[in-house]
Amino acid sequence: MNNIIILTHGWTGSSVFSGLLGRAGYWLGEDTAKKNDYDTFENAELVRLNQRWMKTVAPDLRYEYRFDAADLARFSPQAAGHDIGEAQAFIDRCNSRRPWLWKDPRLTWTIRLWEPMLDFSSVSFLLLTREPKQAWISANLRRHVQSWRFTREYGESVTQANLAFVARTGRPHLALSFEDLLLKPEDTLSRMNGVFGCQLRMEDLQAVCREPLYRRSRGLGDGVKAAMIFIKNFKERDGRSLSAP
């Protein structure tokens, strides 16, 4: 099986996809980053290296709250700087445990720094999206207060940038939404097995997915709660998190 790199914006159920592929034999890391209430299934060392690169290359970029294609140009291979040796050592450790999987939303930007060091001939890509309404509800319920317009435009911009990058590499890829997995789980697992050469089953999905299948994860009640949070905090509607400075 090829290694897999997941490229995505926020609120796409990427942790479910990562946990699912982990059950198919993909190595997720010696330690995975965790949120308060769930495991992200992100290689903690990958996250640390990406965080450092973001602070070094674009310290003023609040990537969760803005997307501008001009920012991508700042992440040229030359910007990797003195971290190249540590990054290459990390890649070597991953390759010793292949097939591996990388997932971190920062990869939309930092994949350009990783590119010269990676052997893309052994990499496939999974591009994840989310129905904008579902993403907007999820973001606001988690107090990342943002407007519907911001959620839609941000997600579309990130997705188009990731599609363009993957097209340039010429590598196999699969584009899916979280709703594909929830509403059409058997078909989605079949598509993943076909592209990635794994053998995922419904039992694997049921072991990692806390959401009910054959329905969207956010319903009318969630939408009402999200709208109330947004209205109460309308001054934050430009996409800034309530917890942001």
Image (cartoon, grey):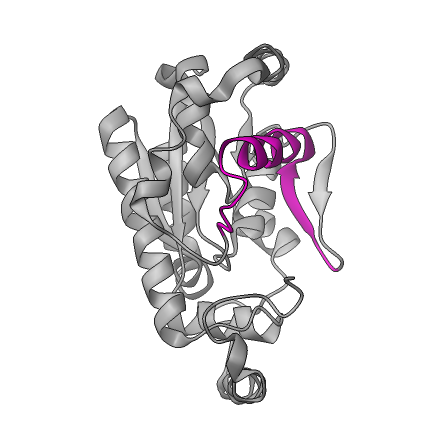
In magenta segment, residue 59: yes
Work out whether residue 18 can be spotted.
yes
Work out whether residue 2 can be spotted.
no
The answer to whether 169 appears left or right of 142 in the picture is left
The one of 164 and 62 positioned closer to us in this rendering: 62
> Percent position (x, y) of residue 113?
44, 24
Kindly identify the residue that appears in the image at 52 percent across and 50 percent down.
14
Kindly identify the residue that appears in the image at 66 percent across and 33 percent down.
48
- Quadrant for the N terminus in the image: top left
Kindly identify the residue that appears in the image at 51 percent across and 67 percent down.
213
> Percent position (x, y) of residue 16?
57, 51
The one of 12 and 148 positioned closer to us in this rendering: 148
> Percent position (x, y) of residue 66?
42, 56
Q: Is residue 223 above or below residue 84?
A: below
Q: How many dots with numbers?
A: 0
The answer to whether 224 appears left or right of 155 in the picture is right
In magenta segment, residue 131: no
Kindly identify the residue that appears in the image at 38 percent across and 52 percent down.
67
Residue 232 in which image quadrant: bottom right
Q: Is residue 91 above or below residue 242?
A: above
Q: Is residue 97 above or below residue 37?
A: above
Extreme-front residue of the structure: 60
For the record, the magenta segment spans 37-63
The answer to whether 208 appears left or right of 113 in the picture is right
- Quadrant for the C terminus in the image: bottom right
> Percent position (x, y) of residue 151?
40, 67
The one of 206 and 114 positioned closer to us in this rendering: 114
